[in-house]
Amino acid sequence: MLPLLLNFLLGQTTPAMPPPEEVVQPQEVRPLPGQLDTVPMFNSNSPELVLEEGILLSTFPPDGKKVPTAHLNFPFRGRFDVFAHHVAKAEPPENLRPLYLGIILYNPGSELVKVNILQAASYLSQPDAPFIELPSFSQNILGKVFAGPGDRAMSDILRGKRQEIFPAQIEIPPGQSRMLLNLPIPVQGLTPPLNGRSTLIRLWSNGTVYAASLAMFARVNPDGSERGLRQPVRVASPTGEAGTPTNEEIISCTILTTAANELLQPIHERMPVILEPQDYDLWLDSQVQTPQTLQQLLRPYPAPAMTAYPVSTLVNNSRHNSSECIMPLSQKNAPANQLN
């Protein structure tokens, strides 16, 4: 019986594992049939989390800029793309004003530039395109499957779409800029108060343009409504060289005024002459020598295109040069001598 038991135990012993060996399976590596294109991309993504106002990315020339090294001096012409992804966060938590993201295009030349918006899409993380888990493979015939605003924006672009908020074309007069994008990133009502926006635009320009992305927290009007970035206006002012009593040459600027419109009449009887965009070329044309032609431009600016609100008396001192000078001041909380 004992020899039989020993034979049985020996038969149940686990055999020794063979030493590991390397198995090589040769495969052919083939290049993809396409290649990277040469279309330049304006890529505004740093910082991703925007906590302060200012210029996020600029391809403008550095000449005359406060921080020249912050401007890339890269002109766009023909086909180019714009991508922007930024996140807004309530910081501090009670600051629930939306962050406005703007992108401007500037025409440095002497002729009108037309920029065609071929495809364009811009979405918020909430509520447009929240980040959700998706299966590893999903049919997306209708473009309804996406996770995140960048995913949804790219899906629209690949389908040749242009959202209705974008025009088909932007015209930029010589020496002027136009807003390509001006949209908010709201955080109010979100837990946590955090939100993001992704934008992708395909463009074609018949002339040279520079681009810049900007961030600004919404300003609050006296009636409680909010406003974001605005298209700059131009004030009529003759400029030139003048002489001092000591024959010292200086550069001078005079702001022309006209009768106040109905919005400003309760504040003052006069207001600066603000030119309409279609009048810029006429005003700057040095060949125009007849006063009657220019006199018609010295009219009050339309009141519906303006907003008035009280500000601090800081604005009365030219040594104050900060955004605090134009911050709205609550009418009911401010002393009478603090309103302008």
Image: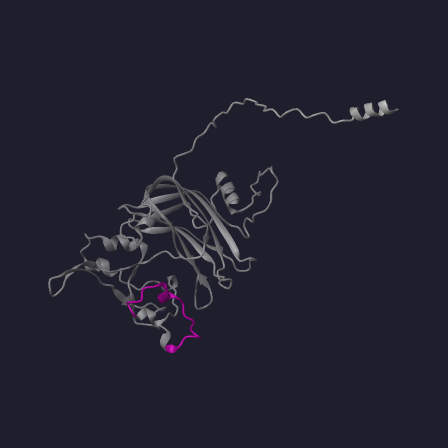
Q: State left or right for residue 101 relative to residue 314.
A: right
Q: Quadrant of the C terminus?
A: bottom left
Q: Is residue 107 above or below residue 272?
A: above
Q: Which sits in the foreground, 79 or 280?
A: 79
Q: Which sits in the foreground, 195 or 119?
A: 195
Q: Is residue 319 above or below residue 192?
A: below
Q: Is residue 265 visible?
A: no
Q: Is residue 35 visible?
A: yes
**Picture coordinates of residue 153 (x, y %)?**
50, 44
Furthest-front residue in this view: 2
Q: State left or right for residue 95 relative to residue 105.
A: right
**Picture coordinates of residue 8 (x, y %)?**
82, 25
Q: State left or right for residue 78 relative to residue 12.
A: left
- Please tell me whether residue 329 belongs to the stretch shown in magenta: yes
Our reading of the magenta stretch's main secondary structure is loop
Taking the spot 30% from the left edge, 70% from the top edge, the residue there is: 316
**Picture coordinates of residue 276 (x, y %)?**
31, 57
Q: Is residue 322 above or below residue 62?
A: below
Taking the spot 45% from the left edge, 29% from the top edge, the residue there is: 34
Q: Which sits in the foreground, 200 or 148?
A: 148
Residue span colored magenta: 317-336
Q: According to the image, what is the colour scheme of the structure?
A: one colour
Furthest-bottom residue in this view: 336
Taking the spot 34% from the left edge, 72% from the top edge, the residue there is: 313
